Amino acid sequence: MPLLEMRDICKSFSGVYANENVSFSADKGEIHALLGENGAGKTTLMNILFGLYQADSGEILWKGKPAEFASPREAIEAGIGMVQQHFSLVRNLTVLDNMILNYSGNRFFLDRKKERQKLLTLSERYGLEVHPDARIADLSVGERQRVEILKTLYREIELLILDEPTGVLTPQETSQFFRMLKDLKNEGYAIIIITHRMSEILEISDRVTVLRDGKKVAEHLTAETNADQLAHDMIGRDLHGLTYTEFGEKEGAPAAGESADKRDENRQPVLELKAITRRAGKHTHALRDISLCVHAGEILGVAGVEGNGQKELAEVITGLKQATSGELLLDGKEIGHASVRERYESGISYISDDRQSDSLIPDMNISDNLMLRDYASPPYADGLLIRRGAVKENAKDKMKEFEVRASGTQGAETKVRLLSGGNQQKLIIARELSDRSRLVVAAQPTRGLDIGATEFVRERLVRKKESGGAVLLISADLEEIFAISDRVAVLYDGRIMDILDRNELDIRRIGLLMGGVTKESV
Amino acid sequence: MSQLFTLSFFTAFLAAAVRLAVPLIYAGLGETIAEKAGVINIGMEGVMLDGAFFSFAGAWYSGSLAVGLLCGIAGGVLMSVLHGVICIVLAQDQTVSGLAINMFALGLTSFLFKLMSQGQSYQQVETFETYAIPGLSKIPLIGAAFFEKDILCYLLYILLILFTIFYKRTDLGLSHIAVGEAPHAAESAGIPVHLFQWTALLVNGVLGGIGGAYLVLVQLGVFTENMISGRGYIALAAVILGRHMPLGMFAAALLFGLANALQIRLQTIGVSVSPYLLAILPYAMTLLAMLGAAGRSSRPESLGKPYVRGSR
């Protein structure tokens, strides 16, 4: 008897099926991967299990008995925990308070001293380092992920659901995380992991269920399948290869063959940072003496564990924050004191790692979000008024060109909040990668996206570079850095540890640099 | 002017300030609790007015202060339940609902009072007695102001301390904070968001009702139309100025009490400034205080946003 069985689950949102007759099961001591593109219905299925949504029909058997969880509280009480992709943390509370929030081990009065100890023990045991008194709002996305995982482990659960858990971890952290998952599995936990990364599925899972368009299309034992088959099941077509570049392999990578030195000679520097320094704030990390250069027709990857100054680097370049000292040049012109708009108008685009708060206004619709950066200039502005016709026209073109799909019937009038992560990101790219953009600062541009969308985003960045633009790709995902960068800078503690050419790339070396270890200190 | 500087003047001045502040503190505490859970009740003015009227009616008809108090509480709760139905069940705009409640309460109480009084005037009910706390009430300056009060005022001190502990030290208090900060996260942690918001609103009604009743049953013994005259709004300001914590709100409300007492004193000793100008003082101070508090928001992040389960 499986620990969990879901039978013929159906769920629709305003007439559109998110799940259609999906059956799914999970056993003790098993890692079951749930695979599918964004919008395939994976998260909906798990939200139903976790009591966030109610199924329209179908049944759930928990330990052999029919169960229906009306709320997450009931699911947690039954022994089901879930780490959601959009974090469920209270930003203004500390790590510890988030841990003990509504924890069943609490008495009426909180015993923070005891719980703190428990948290530290747990975080040490699973190698998930956190600071109990830090406020969530001050943590990087990667750190928040750690808190989320710990929070779930904190509660006595038997089934753990993880929605895209590794998107924000470094390779070292990921392998540590996998060791932890295997430990949990051996302790008898059932684990459901929602992911789009083939390598992970093949490495960690025992079984794979593939969803496409809300329907279950396949279920395999991991040992009996391979990446090609899974990819085919998932998207029903073959991929081009930007996503599949394995470490060390270089085919499919657009920059292959040419040596970096040769390229540099005949290419103009687009962005130059000279000794950029920024003091650490209460909630921000420092930048220390950063000098780098991004040339036309080049993708410079910035690798590093999050929270080492990535956000600050991106924001100093795009103008959201000011450097304390140093020079910032765009096409040879000093822009260190230019406003965000001036920088945008002279060609700096920004794809932020926090798309919902930095790049989009979730409660506004697609067409308005598409003109957020240009609303004050033609063709959208006509004196004091906005020309709705031009806005609509633009939305129509961009949605088509960039394959932005709005589920439902409202088209360009759909609120951005209702789009899937992949479509939100496509929308941002449609806005930011205009013809006049000279430099694209892309921070974690494919985080949380499925393979199809990931490939799309990378392809667009490569296309930008091929048309002579410069791209600064900040990513915690080494696979991504390796796949499309021409050179790779490693950021650690606000410092550039080293800048490597494509042909010197070596996962181990980069991993060490990311951990602050230089050649000299080895 | 020399009388301004005697100890007895300051003692009386402080006592007046506390007296003026107590209804504000009751309402402010109720509002703090609702706002912590993410529901803003601009209708505090209406809640207090309802509390004042029904406490007066209850005490008048039954001749009992206890019955009056209970009626006042019921009156306050009535208004916040109305607010809850609109804001929690129907997920409508909280500001609009609150304003509507203020208008509604004004109309309702004025109408019922007309029916009740039938043209007679000067109806008076008896008021709660004061008890001096031995020892404490003998402290110079503050003794008389804080410890020669009625039972409702002492209850208020206890509530302030209890709610401070509640938010800082208890499981339930932490959950309430989470509901106002991030309802989706709270729901994922298994907290029944709507239930908590309802509880908070009920407490809001009870305390707001007492705040209104306090004016009638402790201080004046009478009801007059629109007698709250802005106290509900000042209580809202005190909550913000007090950074959404019970003791902070307490201090802020005392400050308003002081401003009001000062304005009355200045009028009675005949300072040659227009009394109308002086009457602005507490409100001007409110504005100044808000300016001073700008940029240091303690506002719960999801305050005023209706929470709909299952929405993204």
Image (spheres, coloured by chain):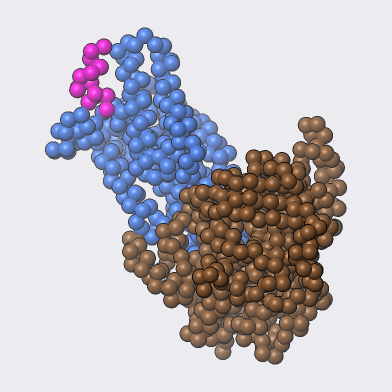
Chain colours: A brown, B blue
Q: Position of residue A377 (x, y in %)?
A: 79, 38
- Is B107 left or right of B19, judged from the image as shown? right
Give the quarter of the image for residue B2.
top left
Is the N terminus of chain B in the top left, top right, bottom left or bottom right quadrant? top left
User: How many discs mark residues in the rendered view?
Assistant: 0
Can residue A45 be seen in the rendering of this structure?
no
Q: Residue at x 30, y 47 (%)?
A: B161
Between A198 and B19, the residue placed more toward the observer is A198
Give the quarter of the image for residue A464.
bottom right
Q: Residue at x 77, y 68 (%)?
A: A259
Q: Residue furthest top?
A: B272
- Is A197 left or right of B142, judged from the image as shown? right
Region of the chain picked out in magenta, as a range? B1-14
Give the quarter of the image for residue B119.
top left
Q: Position of residue A441 (x, y in %)?
A: 69, 55
Between B224 and A441, the residue placed more toward the observer is A441
Examine the rendered structure and indicate whether residue A261 appears above or below residue B115.
Answer: below
Examine the rendered structure and indicate whether residue A138 appears above or below residue A197.
Answer: above
Can residue B195 be seen in the rendering of this structure?
yes
Q: Position of residue A83 (x, y in %)?
A: 55, 69
Q: Residue at x 47, y 75 (%)?
A: A126
Residue B7 lies in the magenta-colored region: yes
Residue B290 lies in the magenta-colored region: no
Examine the rendered structure and indicate whether residue B254 appears above or below residue A405.
Answer: above
